[in-house]
Structure formats: C-alpha cells, structure tokens
Amino acid sequence: MIRINRLVIGMIFLLTCPTLIMAITKEDIKFQKSTRVVLRKHCVSCHNEADKKAGINLDAFDFVSQIIRRGELFENVIEQSMSGAMPPAGKPRMNVAEMDSLVIGIRRILDEALAQPDPGESIMRRLSHREYTYTIQDLVGVTFDAIGFFPTEGSGGEGFDNQSRVLFITPLMMERYYTAADSIISMASQNINSWNQIFTEDYKPTFFRKLWSSLQKIISNKPIHWEQPRKVAKKILLPFATKAYRRFLSTDEQDQLLDFFEKIYFQNWKDRKAFNKAIQASLKSMLISPHFLYRFEVNLPSEQPYAINNFELATRLSYLLWSSTPDETLLNVAYRENLQDPEVLRREALRLMEDEKFKRFSKSFAPQWLGIEELLHSPKSDPIQFPEMDESLRFAMVQEVVELFQYAFEQRNLISLLDSDYTIINERLAKHYDLIGIKGDHFRPVEHRDNTRGGILGTAAVLTSTSLPLRTSPVLRGQWVLDEILGEPAAPPPPDVPALEVAKSKVHNELDLRALLEQHREAPECSGCHQKMDPLGLSLENFDAIGRWRSHYTDPLMDNPEITISFAPVKIDASGKIDDVKINGPQEMRMYLLSEKDKFAKTFSKKLLSYALGRGVEFLDSPSINQLTETLLVTNFDSQELMIQLILSYPFRHRRSDSALKYLTS
Amino acid sequence: MQGKNRISRRKILKGIGASLSLPFMESLVPSSLYASTLSNSNGPQRFACLFMPNGVNPNKWDPSQSGNELELSPILQPLESFKDRISVFSGLMNKHSISRHDGHYTKTANFLTSMPIERTVDANVNSGGISLDQLMAQSIGKQTIYPSLQYGLDRIRSGVDKAVGFTRLYGGTISWQNASQPCSREIDPRMAFDRLFRNYIPGKPPLKEDPYKKSVLDLVKEDAHQLRKQLGIEDRNKLGEYLEAVRSVEKRLDNQVNLADFEAQITPDIKKELKKMDIRIDEWVEYAEGVDITAKTRLMIDIMVLAFWSDASRIATFMFGNSVSNRNYSFLEGVHAGFHSVSHHRDDPRQLAQYEKINHWHIQQYAYMCERLDNIQEGNHTLLDNSMLLFGSGLRDGNRHSPYNLPIVLAGSAGGKLRTGCYHQYEDKTPLANLYLTMLQAMNIEQDRFADSDGNFRELLV
C-alpha cells in the first residue's frame, strides 16, 4: 500500500518536473534496487542524517550522480567494506551477495564515471582584483591598485582568489567599479602615451556643420544628427571593445555601443570637447559592463561536454599565464587559426610563457599556494619583539619566494622548490639571513654555504607565516607541510580537547612546548596527526619566528616577560621521528620531503588545476590530476611540460553545459 | 487605527519639498496623536552589531543581578556608566553552531543568521539564510541612502582552512544579503568616510558626479539582459548579483528624496564633526595606520555614529576581527600574545588573564560607541536610546570552541521599546534567535519567527 502510494507520488512528481526526467536514469533505478538496499540495511543505522557517525550520512544518496559527486567518500565505503572494518564488530555482517552488490555496484558506478571525460563545472568568473589590475594595465595602460581599492574578498577551491564561486558582486563593489572606471579613464586621458594608444583619431565638426546644425535647431527643432562622429568613434571604440570583451562584438552590440556614443555626443554637440567626452563615457561603460567584468563562456544546449570556442580558450590561457586579457596576437590566432589544435595551443602557451608578463603567474600563484600573502598586508609578528619586521623586509620575504618559484619554472625544475643550494635575495634579506657582501635592492641568486636553508622551507616568508606573533609553532609549521606540500591535511583537533597539564619545566616556553607536544602524542585522540605534524615542525625549530637562524633558545620565557630569571641559552633540539624515519634539522627534513616527492607532485598538480579552472578539484578531476602528477614524475618535475599538459588537458579546453538550460531558454 | 492616521515622514517630505530642514520633526508632530509611537517623534530606530571573534574568558564575563541593580563583571566594567541602559544575556546559543565541523567558521558566518553553515571550500557557499541586519535593512533601510553599512578592521583572510574544509570567507562575514551572498565590508576609514560624507566636508570642494552615470548604468543593464540569454542557470545567478548591484546604485541615484533628506540632516553640528573626522583620519593615515588599532577602531565607530546621526544609514555591522584572528594585543599592558592563541588558554591562569584583558579592550570600544551615541540628543531621547547596539561573539570559551551560553550584550532601548538594566538568565540552549526576533518586533518588523527561534522575550519588550 505504502509502496503504491510512493510510486504514484513519484510518477506525478516525474510528470510535472521535466528536469528530473533527465536526472533519473536506468543506472539510478539499478542502484536503487540493489546497492542502495544494502547501504540501507547495513550502513544507514549509524550513518544517517541524525547520527552522522564520523560525519557521514549515507542515507542521502538516491541517484548515481550523487554517488559520483562524493566519489572519494564512496571509494572509502568500498575500502572499509572490503577490509571488514565496516560494518563494525557487533553489527550484522554482510553476506557475499550483499558485499558484491555494494562493492561492485559502487565500483562500477565510479569507474564508468571516470571513464567519461568530464570537464566539471565552469561558472563564469568575475575578474579577481588582481586580474582587474593587470587587465587594466594591459588594456588601458594605467596602473590601478584594485586590491587596495575594492572591498576585501575571500578565496576558495584550493585557496586561490580566482575561484568563480567566491567572486561576488555586491552593491558596494558596483559603486567601486564605477568610481574605478571613472578614474581609470580620466587617468588614461591625462597620460599622452596611453591616451594616444586608445584615442587614435579625433573628430571636430567643421564650422559649417556647426552653423548648419544651429540653424536647423532653430528652424525645425528636430534632434540634431549627422553621421561623421559615429564613423570616427567606431574606429576607436570597436578595437578597444574587442580587447575589453576578449571577443568580437556582434552587430547588435556594436550598434548599441555606438548608439550610446551618439547619444552622449549629441547631448553635447556644441561643446568643443563633445567627441572626447562621448568617447570617454563609452569607454567607461565598457569597463563596468558584465562582458568585461565577467569571463563568461557560451552555454550550448548540449548533453555532452563540448570544446569551448577559440576566444574562450584564448581567454582561459591568458588569464592562467598572465592573469590578464589576451594580447592582440593571441586574439588574432584565435580568429585566424584553430586554437583548439594542440600544436597551435602549445605554440601559443610557450609564447605566453616566454613573455615578461608570465612573471605575474609566479607572483599570483606562489604566495597564494604557500599562504604567505598576508605578509604583504600586515606584519604577523609582534612589533616590540621583532622591530625589524618593517614593510620593506616583509615585501622582500614574499619576493624571495616569488623569485624562487619563477626561477624553478624557468629552470624547468620544480623539485628545487623543496631543496636547493641557493636562494634569491636582496641586501635587506641577506642581512636578515646573516649573509654578507650582498648590496642593493635587486634580487639575485646567492649560494647557500651551509645546509641550513634551501628551497621554500628555508625562506623567511614561509617560516614567519607559520609562526605565532611572539614565538615559533612547530604544530603550525608541521601542519603547513602536511597541507601545502604533502597534501595530507590533518584533521582538526577533536571538539573537546582535554586540557593538557602544562609541563613542569618553566625554563623556556619552547621547551614547555616540546613537553606539551609529547603529551599530545601520547593522547590517542591527538596522536594520529601530531605524530607526523610535530616532528616536521620541530625539525625547523632552528628558525625563529621571523625565520632567522638560531642554534640556541637565548630569550628566556618570551611569553611571560614578567617572570625574570637568569637564563642560560638552551641548545635547540630539532630531532624527531616520522614513521620510524629519524629526522634532525632542516636538511634531513628536506631529504624526507624529497623521498615523498610523489605526494608533492600530486599536491602541486591539484593546486595548479584548481587555479587554472577557477574551482575546487573534485572526484571527477582525478584522471586529470593523475595525469599531471605522472607528467611531473616522468619529466623530473619539468614545470614547462606540466603547464603544457595542463593547458592541453580535457577540463581546460572543454566545458559542460548547465544541464537544465534547455528547459529554461526560449 | 493608528496606522491609518499616521503620515509617514517620507510622505510629508515629498509633499513639502526637500529643502526644508527637518531634524526628526519634533515641532510638526502633535504629541497626542503620536503618544504611543514615541520612537517616531524622537528619531528613528537604529541597529548596530559589534562582533568579537574568539570568545571570552568565561570566568570573568558573567555579571550578576542584585535586586534592581546590575553588577558588572570585570570584563564588562567599562559599561559601568551605562549599566541601566544595557541588557546582558546568558544561556543563549545558535543551535546550528553545533555540528560535526568544529571550530570557528560555523559560529561566525551564522552569528546573525542563526542557521547552519554549509561546509565548503567554495562550491556552495551558504550561510543558511539572510542575516538579522540585512532583514532589518530590507525594511527600515529603504528610508536612508545606504540601507546598511558593513565595517571591519581586517582584510578577509585569504585561503581555505584545510583542516576543517571551510573557505575562510566564512570567518570574515556576518552580514548576508541572502544565504549565498555575503555583503562586502569596508576596512579603510578613509574610504568608508568618503563614501558617506565626501561631499559634505566643510572646506573641501565637492566631487563632481558623472553626468552620464545614469545612461551608463542603463547601457550595462541592457548588456546584462542580453548576456543572460546565453547563460546557464548558475551563470544567471551570478549575473543576478550583478543586476542587483547595478539596481542598488541606480536607486541611490534616483532617490533624490532620500538624498535631500540626508543633506537636510547635515546640521552645522554634524558639519563640524565631519571636518574634525576628516582631519583625524588624515592624521591616522599619517602617523598610526598599521600601528594603532584602537585608533582605527574608534575611527570606524565614529563613522558609524556619524552615519546614524546624519541618518545616512540606520543599520551597521562591525567585525573586530575575522574568526580565528590572532591579532597581536601586546599593546595592552600584560598581554604578550595573539588573541586566538590566548583564547586556547588550556586553563593556564596566565593565559586566562591575558584573554580577559583582550575581552576588556573590546568592551571598552563598545562602551565608547555607547558613549558617543549617548552624547547625541534626538528629541527626548539620545541616539543610544534609539538604538539597539548588540555586542557578542559566536563562541563562549575559546579553549573549548563552545557555542553554548554566548556572551551577548544589548545596549539602548530601540526608542523606548525595550527594557534595559537587567541580567537575563535564560535556560541553557535558548535560541539566540529569540532575542533577534524580539529585536525585530521592537522595530515593528512583523515576523513570526527568525531562523530557529521558538518564541520571543516578552519580558524584554516594554
């Protein structure tokens, strides 16, 4: 009875809801009849909406698409079931048939999904503040600090500011966009060089034209109009529009823009500067147009993923490599050749990577990936404890990482990011690192004489960003290595961490900390993560909270200056053990990381893919990620080949249509 | 009955033209007619929320009540001279803050929405619903040029928090225009001030408004409508944001009545203050930017006060910091660490003492805002009387990330609508949304519920 009711309701629902007809497939029915039955019988009693054991609710999955979306979770379901860990002891076991239905059923769903290339979701992206700055620079020739001027924003995906889902436009943003456009165009018009690039022709009506129009006005009182200004304006506005919108404008769009121009022009036609004014207003309108502010891609009503068009691909390419709009050459290639042709695409990618503007990629990607961006905005460290942390030092710190990254890219050797016998610094940083004989503000490669520093883990930027204001934190540093290098983020501490007894030793806070950490590792709920995190962090203890080398703790009780006791320097112990591998100090830690380079390769690939696609990576991206990881490992971390493979990858060149679209257009 | 006879201030303004200076219209209102709507004749109601990250030292927060007298706790001490003008609450919580996902984010982004937060690094940013301030803005915000203001001290932290799987955006946002759209917030005093008052600072030539702004906006709106046709659903939602934003700018441009109203409100007194503020901000930029956080906080507070006073806006939120903020408070005597570090005090008395001092500093700033508002007279009321000034944190004890029994203070009486001077001890797990619902009712915003509310606080209403 109940069954029938459900069926009837289901039918009615299906009949009235066209989008769901699409959603329910044969596969869904098969899943609901077999695998879901087993899930419900054996898993859902604990993993349901209310209990959510281990944070997992397996009761919410009715469609194959949902399983695929949470592919990693279901990989885990398979693993747990096969190993016999689930259902747990004391609960009824699955029989062989049930086990097959669950494991094989899910496996098949996931494998079939992975076999179909899927570019994932691509939502139109608003220009990030950074991209806005560069785009304006390349398009208008004006320097505009968008990061300072626009409201501050968050990031998403793998932690980047260019992720479509977190790029909002709010009323305040719109106000600022308007003001920005206003000042950008007015700045441009005051700079002869940049203005001449845009304002390629001028128009002044003849004396007779003006006289005639004035007379006309008096006689007929009809709106004044003549053709010439529009013709000249067209020559100025259309090339600009093509670059601003990163594509050709349709005739309708052209007309609309020129109509607008005319409207402003003939409102002011008596004015000596009418033409200039109308041009400026038109340019401004383009800078706040959605065509400019968003990088959108045409949504085709297609069930299957499809290749994006040449202009869209050119735009993806230039924003990936230059954080900016395509140049004329690239637009020309998009127009005259087939950019989707791998040979053409590779050629253009290489050209862009050889350009000076490619440095922007390092500047944008590296600090965001490594989480050191905040150093550009504020000192993390305590100003009294570390008075030397002024702006020029902080900027130099970030620049060192950018330079190292850029150099690794140019050398086609990304593994040097983990270990190198050089760094790239200026005088300010050299002083910070106690290196002598380096003069001047420019950054240059400097050989490390000993093995203390090397790679990004030896940079003051990373070491400072992973410290607390007054002292180092081995936990934060360890967690950072797990997150950003090894890609094994630690779980958060359990909700009610039992209060730890503060260790008896009050000699030095850092010593306190070591004892405290040892306690952590004894507590079963903490040991899992801290066993790995702590030794990684402790191996870097020879670097203080702003990344200077120290052999001893010399500063007694930094956190508690009220307590003054005489203090003999304490030698730093930077030793630890990870999975039975002993590491002591930064050099051995780097060796350890090199031994885990496949994990680094995967982490880096994930980050890069997320940055390129403007979204978080998902289960269906795993083929792409595996392919990129493989590229890195096979080519010995060749950055150039990695980039090319990324650009040639399926998700970079394709998009998936918003499936419900066809029901809504018309 | 009442509603029928009442003439809205707006209508009057429209009728008699915009040039008349009408600071709250005392003289025009026959008191008998408005006896029961005292708040109207004594100036409009305002709401501000000051959000503190990282919770409080739980041992030093709770006040007590002896007879009619509120006995303040050490942290609340700076409010001594306002203690009959505030209410302190205990037992309140956002129940959706308890989740499998511990930490700060689920307790920050929903501070004013009281709804569950979607755990995501970006795919589906969702705060569960509109925030209290934005709901108020939808209704009373229409009467001012700026429906609401969002301020803070820090940039939103970049990156995602891998450990818990949240975008840090959640830690930097308490105002939500709707579930999926956070409001932008201003962190720069100069820009915040200039946005509201740039054209009214004595001695500074007003900026020229672009004469073609309206035409330009029309044009890009047309662009957006055409673009829409080529987009899928998700993209249309994004474009919806764009259109909404354009409309709001247009609205401001169109609404000459509000503008004239606002300009009329800029009395010589306010002008004097504007001039002073202008100089103070310059000085701050010159000498204290990036150094003196107390000075910056006070500037932001003063801008909110000026906005309320001049009726540029009636709704504001302010974030002392992003959640998990580890702002270094060593400028306070006896504090030697960042806020977040100290909040994980592990019951160490030395850490707890510092935690308390940092909390105390926040209450000082809150008290400063009370004082500033109280210095401004509106009819028989002060601006403080006309306001609901909420202070709170999404956590209680930072060490335990506890979302129970939140530290909440409310100052002002919403123009005589709310009782003050009491310590309200509610049963554990009482929805914070009950307070929010009560506040909405005090503003005559009719709602049966707000988020997870299961009733209002009748004892709070006059």
Image (cartoon, coloured by chain):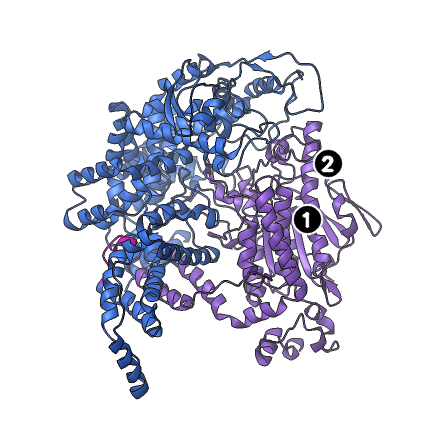
Q: Considering depth in this image, is B451 or B260 the residue closer to the camera? A: B260
Q: Chain of mark 1?
A: B
Residue under numbered circle 1: B366
Locate residue A361: give its quadrant.
Answer: top left
Quadrant in which the C terminus of chain A appears: bottom left
Distance between mark 2 and mark 1 Cα atoms: 20 Å
Q: Which mark is residue A29?
A: none
B160 part of magenta stretch: no
Nearer the observer: mark 2 or 1; the answer is 1
| Classed neighbour count for the residue bearing mark 2: other residues with Cα under 10 Å, few (<14), some (14–19), many (≥20) | few
Same chain for labels 2 and 1? Say yes or no: yes
Give the crowd class for mark 1: few <14, some 14-19, many >=20 residues within 10 Å.
many
Question: Mark 1 falls on what kind of element?
Answer: helix
| Mark found first going from the N terminus, 2 or 1 | 2
Nearest the eye: A247 or B344: A247
Tell which chain the image draws in blue.
A
**Chain B visual colour:** purple
Residue A261 picture location, percent across and down? 31, 67
Relative vertical location of residue A497 with respect to residue B281 in this rendering, above or below: above
- Residue to which mark 2 is pinned: B59
Residue B48 in view:
no
* SS for callout 2: helix
Looking at the rendering, the stretch of residues picked out in magenta corresponds to A242-250
